[in-house]
Image: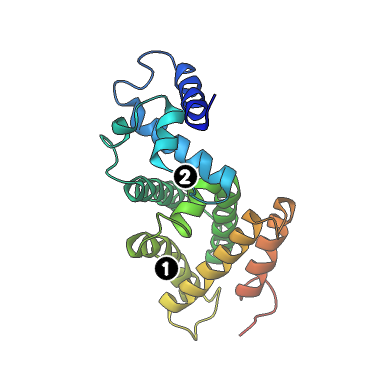
Amino acid sequence: MDHVSAEAGRDSAVRMTKPPGAYRHGDLRNALIAAATELTVQRGGPDFTLREIAAITGVRHAAVYRHFASKGALLEEIARLGVQALKTRIEQKKAASPGDRLEAIAADYLDFAVTRPGEYRVMAQEGGASPSQYRALLDMMCEPIASAQAAGATCKGVPSDLLARLWWAELHGIAMLALNSAVQTSEIRDCVRAVSHIWRRDAGKPTY
């Protein structure tokens, strides 16, 4: 069997594992998103083609384009959904004080990154990242930081928008180190406590 035939055989085998009609009635869109997210996890980034995604989901290549005009459009949708999910988690977070809220947000942010690595890589770093997505991520940090400043729970000598950028940059840095195995998942909780202690004026010795 030549290389082309072997590839075709593998693709057919993948397609045959899906029951007839499995992706009708709107299911294909979510299946494409799930397949792309999983490959991103496996490969450490969105290093795949739409043809691969079609084979995994058991449809013809052309069927993908009924839902996404390009790979970029697929990645943008993964990023949008990821940002929306993270925003919902953060906005629902309740805490006893603005300082506690910052620590809770840090914990949620890092937990999201390590438990949903495919979505996080796309939405915060590769492929799906865009000025609007970056702004949406930053906006999640702005109001909690401003509230913490107003309550004296963090530094007041820096504009809240800039401080939010620095806070987000620190969380993103830890998240990427964790996804690249430079920080172990078991160390995340300690990282959250340490970073929060450094940033909070109401948790001990101030840093500014």
Residue situated in front as seen by the camera: 22 or 133: 22
Residues marked 2 and 1 touching at CB (< 8 Å)? no
Q: Quadrant of the C terminus?
A: bottom right
Residue at mark 2: 48
Q: Is residue 104 left or right of residue 160?
A: right
N-terminal of the pair, mark 2 or mark 1, is 2
Q: Quadrant of residue 105?
A: bottom right
Q: Is residue 117 above or below residue 102?
A: above
Q: Is residue 17 above or below residue 182?
A: above
Q: Residue 130: give x, y in percent of width and height.
A: 36, 61
Q: Quadrant of the N terminus?
A: top right
Residue situated in front as seen by the camera: 145 or 77: 77
Res 61 visible: yes
Q: Nearer the viewer, mark 2 or mark 1?
A: 2
User: What kind of residue is marked 1?
Assistant: Cys
Give the farthest residue toward the top: 20
Neighbour class for label 1 at 10 Å: few (<14), some, many (≥20)? some
